[in-house]
Every structure is written in C-alpha cells, then in structure tokens.
Image (cartoon, coloured by chain):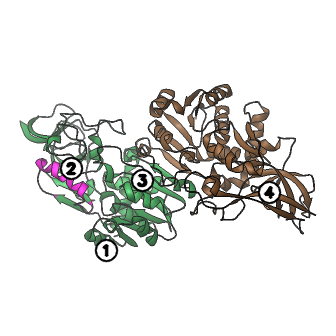
Chain colours: A green, B brown
Amino acid sequence: MSWSSQEVRLAERPRGRPDASTWEIATTEVPEPGPGELVVRVDLLSLDPAMRGWLNDVRSYIPPVGIGEVMRAFATGEVVASQHEDFAVGDPVSGSFGVREHALSDGKGVTRLDLDVAPPATWLGALGMPGMTAWFGLQDVGRVRPGDTVLVSAAAGAVGSVVAQIAKAKGCRVIGVAGGPDKVAWLRDLGLDEVIDRREGDLVRQVRRAAPDGIDVYFDNVGGELLDAALANLARGARVVICGAISSYNESSLPEGPRRYMSLLVFRATMQGFVVFDYEDRYAEGVAGICELIAADRLVATETVLEGGVAGFPDALLGLFDGVNTGKLLLKV
Amino acid sequence: MSWSSQEVRLAERPRGRPDASTWEIATTEVPEPGPGELVVRVDLLSLDPAMRGWLNDVRSYIPPVGIGEVMRAFATGEVVASQHEDFAVGDPVSGSFGVREHALSDGKGVTRLDLDVAPPATWLGALGMPGMTAWFGLQDVGRVRPGDTVLVSAAAGAVGSVVAQIAKAKGCRVIGVAGGPDKVAWLRDLGLDEVIDRREGDLVRQVRRAAPDGIDVYFDNVGGELLDAALANLARGARVVICGAISSYNESSLPEGPRRYMSLLVFRATMQGFVVFDYEDRYAEGVAGICELIAADRLVATETVLEGGVAGFPDALLGLFDGVNTGKLLLKV
C-alpha cells in the first residue's frame, strides 16, 4: 500500500515577497513505512513568520530549505501506518512534517498529542512553538517581574497573544500593539491595559502616552518603526526581547537598523535575541505552565484556521504577513 | 583675594560638529572660598567623547550643559584655598571642575589624589573615568571569561586601550580596531593578538579573518559600520557592550542603526548599554584592579597631553573626534 500525497516544494528562492514562482506543487507516492518508521496523515499545517527566513540561503539558526525540497512546516496529523515502537495507527501526533498530505517519518521530533488536554490546533499554537516562544522569551529572556510595564508587538498574533496574557497573569501592566480596529477590540476583550493601533501612526507618541513611565520589557516580534518607538520609551534597566522582525522578512535587502539603539546606553538596557529551539528540553515546563493558565481562565488559546489544503499554502503564508490571523494561523489540509 | 580665571562656556548648541560659534571664552574672578568650600587651580582637563552628548538638549543619563554655562569637564588640579575640612591647600585633587582655570567647589565629587600611586594624568585616564568604564564595562557588562575572543573598537583610545589590556590579562584573545598605521603598530606593541586598521575598509571581512570562530565580547565605543561588522561575526551567546558611538556623535541627525541587529537572535546574543557613573560606589575596586595590572607590567597607562590652556579646548575636543590621541587625551591648562 502507498499514499498519494500532494506537497509544496521550494522551486526558487524569493527575493522579497514570495510569489507563484517560489513554489512548485507536486504529487508523490508515500510508501509503506519500513522498520522504525511511521506514516502520518497531515491534518493541520502551522504557518509561522520564521518560514520566510528558512527560504533564504544564509547562515542562520537552522539551515535553509533546499531548492526542490518540500517546504518545512510544523503540523499535526494522525498515524496511518507504523513500524515504530513508540507510535500506533490512530495516534494523534505533531512534528515537522512539511507542507504535504502524508509524511514518512523516523519518529524524530514527533510527539504524541494528548487531546484530553487540548485539540490539535492548540498544540500548534499556545501549547506549540509559539506558546513556548512566548513562555521562555518573556520569562527567561525578558526576566519579567510583577508590576513591570510590558509592551508586546503583533499582540494579536500567535506569539504576541500568549505573551500578553502570560504577562497579565504575572501581574504586569500590558500594552499591546496590533493593526486595525478588530484586533484592537479583540485585545481589549482579552484584558490588556492599553492597546495601540499601529495603523494610526506616530508610534513614539502612542507608546509614550500608553507608558509615560517607560517600558520595562519590550517583546519584539516585528522590528522596524515600532522597535525604535519602544527604544525611545524604555524605563531604566529595560529588557528588549528580540523574537522576530516580521516587518522586514519580505524585504529584498537588509532593512535599516534600530536608529535609537543608543537608548540601550541611556536607559542601561539590554537587547537580547533568542531561538525557542534552545529551550526544547524545558517544553514540558512551558506546556504545564500554559495549561495551568488556560485551566484558570487566565489564557485563551486562539487560532485562525484557513481552508484550502496543501495547495493553499502559498496564499496562506502571504496571509500571515498581511495579518489575516487572530492568534495562531493554521491551514487545514 | 580672588583668582582671575579664563573659562569656556557653551554659547550655542552645535548642530553636527562644534565650531567657533559653539563656544564663548570669557574671564571671571573666582572669589575666596566660603565655609565648606575650596578653590582648585585646574592643571589638566580631560577630553571625553561623551562631552559631545552633553551639548545636546535631549533627555539622557545626565542633564545637558546649559547655554551660557561653563563646559562640564573632569580635571585634576591643586587646592589653592580651602575652608573645607577634607581638603587642605596643596592637595592634588580630581573632580568635575569644568573648562576653567580656577574652580570654586563645595567638595562634592572631589577626590584627593595619591600621587605615589600614579601621576594626575593617569588619574584622569586608566585610573579615572575611562579606566573605570573599561573595568566595569568589560567585566560586569561584557561578562568576559578566559579564552573569550574580544573585539575592541577605538582600541588605541582612552577606554579601548585599557579594555584591550585587561582582556589580555584575563586570558582572552584580543582583536583591536584602530585608525592608521601608527596606532596599529602601537597596539601590536601592547601585545594584542590581532589589530585591524579600520581605514583599510571591508570591516566585515577583516573581522571575519581575525575571528574566524566568532566574537564572544564586542566592546563598542564607535557604533556605525564596525558595529555591523561585529554583529555579522558574533559567536553564539556573544555579549555586545554598548559604551559609546563616537562615529556618530557629530551627526546632525540620528544616524542609521545597526542593520544586522537580528544577528542577536541568530547568535542568541545580548547587546547591553551602560553608564560608568552607576558603578561609582565600586570605583575603589576598579582602581585597585588596574593598579595591580600596572604594577605587574600587564597594563600600560598612556596619555596624549595637548598644550594650549583653557582657550585651546575647542580645538582639543575636535582632535578627539579626529583621533589625534593615543590613550587618554588631556589638555594642559
């Protein structure tokens, strides 16, 4: 037996925004698993800003996706065949299965999901990589303390929405930044203290108004103008957590840097980057912590699920950069 | 009795590079000290890159010098009259006396110098603010460890030359960056492992060649292109110490920021700013540490002393930005 599997491959490295020429959609046959292998039927694909970086042929924290290779993606699915001792047919699993309908795997990096704890979508969101990014980035890198004023960019996004809610639960004053009235309203409903609509401009002034005593922790997912606005409004001893820079991922040349970086000196502040994979051996701690917040009704795990199957991946990825999502963006296979 | 005293006042805030219109040179009479006061004859003025920042009317770590006020400057001199119980006529002292020939002081921030330990010039250099900046910046902020590869900018300058020598004494591999063959030769004589002449260009490549395994600590006094070259060549877990940005102090608008700041994420690195004044209560520790290195012939305290008196201050300050000095730049009054 074998499985017909549509998949999305990287055809050409994009300069700037990916387009039709970036991808090739093909169909292959996935064979029966050999000893120590399993086959997963992929149900939900995770769309992550980091994906854009994986398309660039540069030295980074992870090797780029190769030309002709299936696009790397985290996903959930169900085991449909197994010769692997840890997995049985019917097991719900997550892993880096790629943008494909069926994946042959040796079980490395594959996790069996406890659906009593949360549905698969949440295992890709608040309990997945974005949630872990929020948990360790805010606490281990940002060293957040009760009473801190915390500014969160892309606060309606997969990582930002979890960061904002953890910070609230920790007793911080939380200011979220998002684009457009719907997201702003949604963040107000989540209980944030202040919400800034970045589309209203003059971010330096908007941040100053929301945080007149300065920002203790800035959790940066976006870079660009907002990073400068945050730097202009730090409190003494502030921590700037560099998690991402989605505003520039589709630029074809290196964007301008943060012009106000000398604020780090003026405010004796720290800017620190991190990669969530470094915390892999502590994910259980992060999952437990976030589950506890969910159970206590202090954290709402939110996902936006697009239809369209594997072939819908190119558009879904662009949707991420256009901000179509509230919470985690997923694509149903 | 009173003392005729020439002084340099801030006449006008410079845009860009200071010029004749920036300063007013005047002569006043300094009166006899009242109770709790002393008068100091200023002998040596310290020229510091930070002075340029003190001329800007912006919120910073210290208030700007006011229009019409005497220019702020660290200096050494001798007590010529005293009604202060801690100071006697003839005492050698240092303090923030300003650009003037005689200073009336209430004794705050004034330190009696032990000339058996070092001459006044060294008390403004390796044992003064630049030395303390190097000591605490490299160790407390940079968290330098034996075996680290340390990159030092403006390595022939007042701070950089001390940073480089402390790092060597700590068992680091030290790469210095300076401008021109004389400084490069001088730094080689100091025992640095590699010296880069920034005037030879292509800093990314020069740094990569000198540090093929990456930089653990970058001590940044200059900002600009070299900061980006350092960011492009970090080792994992690197610390970037933001001490200054002399390359941009005379820019009339905010210069470009470090375009490669996302290297902080890729390399899990930290960029941290600091202000030496925060370590004031630990200066004794720093002085003792540097004295020990000097006594063990592991650190050479170097100064460049200009003639010209108080009226020579405007030119001497520009000399600092033109890099006329090796080690600490001083002006003889």
Q: Residue at x 9, y 41 (%)?
A: A5
Q: Nearer the viewer, residue A19 or A274?
A: A19
- Residue B213 visible in the snapshot: no
Q: Which residue is mark 1?
A: A189
Q: Which residue is mark 2?
A: A76
Quadrant position of residue B6: bottom right
Q: Which mark is residue A136?
A: 3
| Front: mark 4 or 1 | 4
Question: Foreground: A179 or A68?
Answer: A179
In terms of sequence position, does the residue under pointer 2 or pointer 3 come before the other? 2
Q: Chain of mark 2?
A: A
Disc 2 residue type (three-letter): Thr
Q: Which residues are magenta?
A: A306-327
Give the mark toward the camera: 1 or 3: 1
Q: Mark 3: which secondary structure?
A: helix
Q: CA distance from mark 1 to mark 2?
A: 29 Å
- Three-letter code for the amino acid on which mark 3 is drawn: Phe
Residue A11 visible in the snapshot: yes
